[in-house]
Image: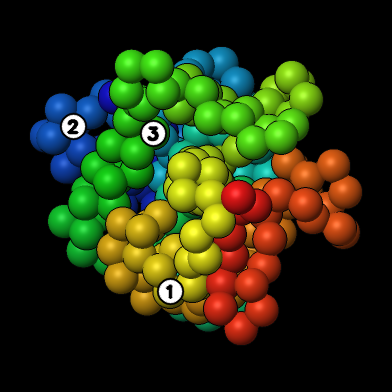
């Protein structure tokens, strides 16, 4: 697995790189968002760990630009813990967040969880999930709307796969946080709302009037049966 670590704090980058290489990952580094975009265009990465505040191009803008050509999972690092910052990050395409200072063991655990989901494949004969005009290829982790490819982040894909496989079943925001993120997420449950809105924008024919990804008011979200 190949990981790109992006931060202008050289000591932090060195420490993360050392620990991830010790786990067997191939690690490349970048000092700012502009360099991260260049490297993400030039090579294929399985995951990006990127700081929020950096010179030249910050992490949010870098994530936004990377999302234009890649669905690679992104873990954002930030020295600020405000939920608003996290929600903005999810808007720009981040899959997960860690607040500095963080425990390197937790970072490695989150990386393993995301990479497991990214590498997961459906069983024989179950590689494609189709619901109306939406098709998910679980082996390639790719999504299509009326046959046209559309990029989903790792968490967006995981959420949509869960809902399509269990169409008609309503999941609360708390359940979705636990099932999709793979741990008791400490942030705001509005994270789920952000991801649902982005999924509707990418997959619904009329995002303002969704027909596939639906809301059960006061309960949660579900896909039509």
Residue named by callout 2? 21
Kindly report which numbered mark, 2 or 1, lies closer to the viewer in this rendering: 1
User: Is residue 180 found left or right of 218 in the rendered image?
Assistant: left
User: Is residue 194 found left or right of 10 in the rendered image?
Assistant: right
User: Is residue 116 found left or right of 193 in the rendered image?
Assistant: left
Closest to the observer, 81 or 176:
176
Asked if residue 80 can be seen in this view, the reply is no
Q: Earlier in the sequence, mark 3 or mark 1?
A: 3
Q: Earlier in the sequence, mark 2 or mark 3?
A: 2
For image coordinates 64% across by 72% down, the residue present is: 216
| Contact, mark 2 vs mark 3 (Cβ under 8 Å) | no
Q: Which percent across, then down, holds residue 3?
A: 36, 31
Residue named by callout 1? 174
Residue named by callout 3? 118
- Tell me the quarter of the image containing the N terminus: top left
Characterize the local packing of mark 3: few (<14), some (14-19) or many (20 or more) Cα atoms within 10 angstroms.
many
For image coordinates 53% across by 44% down, the residue present is: 164
Closest to the observer, 202 or 124:
124
Q: Which percent across, then down, holds residue 171?
A: 48, 66
For image coordinates 78% across by 45% down, the residue present is: 204
Closest to the observer, 33 or 154:
154
Kindly report which numbered mark, 2 or 3, lies closer to the viewer in this rendering: 3
| Contact, mark 3 vs mark 1 (Cβ under 8 Å) | no
Q: Secondary structure at mark 2?
A: helix
């Amino acid at each position: 697995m190949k990981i790109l670590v992006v931060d202008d704090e050289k000591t932090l980058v060195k420490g993360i790189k050392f620990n991830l290489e010790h786990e067997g990952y191939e690690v490349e580094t970048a000092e700012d968002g502009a360099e991260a975009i260049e490297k993400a265009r030039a090579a294929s990465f399985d995951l990006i760990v990127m700081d929020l505040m950096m010179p030249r191009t910050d992490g949010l803008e870098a994530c936004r630009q990377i999302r234009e050509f890649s669905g690679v999972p992104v873990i954002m690092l930030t020295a600020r813990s405000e939920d608003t910052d996290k929600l903005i990050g999810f808007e720009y395409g981040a899959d997960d967040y860690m607040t500095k200072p963080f425990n390197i063991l937790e970072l490695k655990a989150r990386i393993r969880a995301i990479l497991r989901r990214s590498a997961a494949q459906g069983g024989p004969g179950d590689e494609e999930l189709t619901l109306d005009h939406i098709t998910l290829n679980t082996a390639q982790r790719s999504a299509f709307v009326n046959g046209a490819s559309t990029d989903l982040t790792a968490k967006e894909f995981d959420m949509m796969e869960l809902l399509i496989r269990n169409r008609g079943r309503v999941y609360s925001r708390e359940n979705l946080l636990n099932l999709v993120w793979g741990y008791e997420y400490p942030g705001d449950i509005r994270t789920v709302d952000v991801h649902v809105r982005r999924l509707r924008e990418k997959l619904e024919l009329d995002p303002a009037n969704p027909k596939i990804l639906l809301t059960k008011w006061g309960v949660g979200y579900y896909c039509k049966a």
